């Protein structure tokens, strides 16, 4: 999996990484048992602080997506996809409804962003 971060984004880099992992688990790109890159290696590859990667991994662990073991690193939990399947179903339903209404994806994204600032 290729990770990307945007230092200029209003979203923290740790959150950007966590979202990318969540999406990859949801769409099946990261299967249960898949090991994520070691924090130091990923931090070096992205030119970011290792603690930022560890913060993202800890967030994902706390959310039940990853399991972390000393000396074995972080890997996708066997049951990680269970929580994200519903989100994918909702996204599919939202896009289908938007198509019916003639609303484009950019407009849907704007709507989501606006709603996200009110949450």
Image: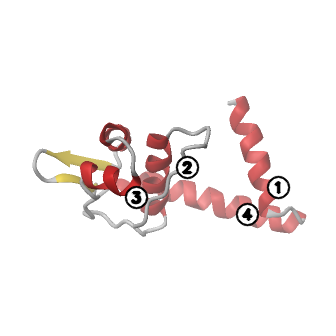
Q: Tell me if mark 1 has few (under 14), some (14-19) or many (20+) residues whose alpha carbon lies within 10 angstroms of its own.
A: few
* Residue 12 image point, x, y percent: 51, 38
Q: Nearer the viewer, mark 2 or mark 3?
A: 2
Q: Tell me if mark 2 has few (under 14), some (14-19) or many (20+) residues whose alpha carbon lies within 10 angstroms of its own.
A: few
Distance from the alpha carbon under mark 1 to that under mark 4: 11 Å
Distance from the alpha carbon under mark 2 to that under mark 1: 22 Å
Q: Nearer the viewer, mark 3 or mark 1?
A: 1
Query: On residue 6, which mark appears?
Result: 2
Mark 1 or mark 2, which is nearer the start of the sequence? Answer: 2
Residue 6 vs residue 90, the one in the foreground: 6
User: Residue 53 vs residue 92: left or right?
Assistant: left
Display colour scheme? secondary structure
Query: On residue 95, which mark appears?
Result: 4
Q: Nearer the viewer, mark 2 or mark 1?
A: 2
Mark 4 or mark 1, which is nearer the start of the sequence? Answer: 4
- Helix, strand or loop at disc 3? helix
- Helix, strand or loop at disc 2? loop
Q: Circle 1 sits on which residue?
A: 107
Quadrant holding the C terminus: top right
* Residue 59 image point, x, y percent: 37, 38
- Helix, strand or loop at disc 1? helix
Distance from the alpha carbon under mark 2 to that under mark 3: 26 Å
Mark 4 or mark 2, which is nearer the start of the sequence? Answer: 2
Residue 104 vs residue 83, the one in the foreground: 104
Mark 3 or mark 2, which is nearer the start of the sequence? Answer: 2
* Residue 4 image point, x, y percent: 49, 57
Q: Nearer the viewer, mark 1 or mark 4?
A: 1
Q: Circle 3 sits on which residue?
A: 81
């Amino acid at each position: 999996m290729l990770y990307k971060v945007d230092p200029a984004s209003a979203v923290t880099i740790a959150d950007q990484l966590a979202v990318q992992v969540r999406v990859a688990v949801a769409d099946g790109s990261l299967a249960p048992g898949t090991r994520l890159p070691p924090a130091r290696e990923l931090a070096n590859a992205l030119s970011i602080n290792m603690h930022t990667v560890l913060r993202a991994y800890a967030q994902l662990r706390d959310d039940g997506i990853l399991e972390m073991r000393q000396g074995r690193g972080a890997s996708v939990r066997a049951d990680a996809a269970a929580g994200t399947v519903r989100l994918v179903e909702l996204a599919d339903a939202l896009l289908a409804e938007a198509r019916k209404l003639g609303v484009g994806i950019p407009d849907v994204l704007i709507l989501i962003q606006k709603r996200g600032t009110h949450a």
